[in-house]
Image: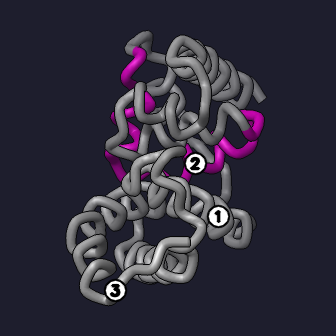
Amino acid sequence: MNIITDKEFEDIMRQYYNEIFHYIRKQTNNTEDAKDLTQDVFMKVYNNLNSYNPKKASIRTWIYRIAHNHTINHFKTKYHQYKLDFDDEYLNYMKQSDDAILEKLIQGEDIQKVIVLMNKTLNKKHLKIMNLYFFSELSYKEIAKLLKSPIKTIYNTINVSINKLKEKMEDIQNE
């Protein structure tokens, strides 16, 4: 059991708060939601520090796992608010052969559409990997460690998922 002082927890918050906030902000595209969710994440970190095992993962990886799970739960409760509606210009943009196209959209204002598309298209495992790929500042190696998967699996899942998302976009355009 880890006993931690308030000062030690403050140090953890000081070190990771901004990074986790930006990770959540990229996913939600909403500063106020990101602030609330980040606060919730650090409350969970504080309340669960006794279950943290440094032999299993770094503190950073452990906090990202909490943030990821909390953000996914947030989207599950808010899922009905987001409509999957794409105009022709957007669909043509997505059909470009550039594999970084989804990353460009994630950086832009259409993040909610991409998140909804990912939720509708990908299975849980692929969705988790793609969320970490797009929204965290974790490396492939860190994602692999976080998910306890081989790094090659992470690379393959990302490529397969991007292709599935592009195919889904084409299907939507043809409807």
Which numbered marker is on residue 115?
Answer: 2
- The reply to whether callout 1 and callout 3 are in contact (CB within 8 Å) is no
Which numbered marker is on residue 5?
Answer: 3
Q: Position of residue 148 (x, y in %)?
A: 60, 32
Q: Quadrant of residue 79?
A: bottom right
Query: What residue would you read off at disc 1?
Result: 75
State which region is magenta. 99-124
Which numbered marker is on residue 25?
Answer: none
If you read the primary sequence from the N terminus, does the residue marked by circle 2 or circle 3 appear first?
3
Three-letter code, disc 1: Phe
Three-letter code, disc 2: Ile
- On the question of residue 33 being in view, the answer is no
Q: Residue at x 43, y 39 (%)?
A: 134
Q: Quadrant of residue 107?
A: top left
Secondary structure at badge 3 equals loop
Indicate left or right for 6 with 114 as reference.
Answer: left
| Residue at the far bottom in the pictured view | 6
Closer to viewer: mark 2 or mark 3: 3
Q: Position of residue 111 (x, y in %)?
A: 46, 50
- The reply to whether callout 2 and callout 1 are in contact (CB within 8 Å) is yes
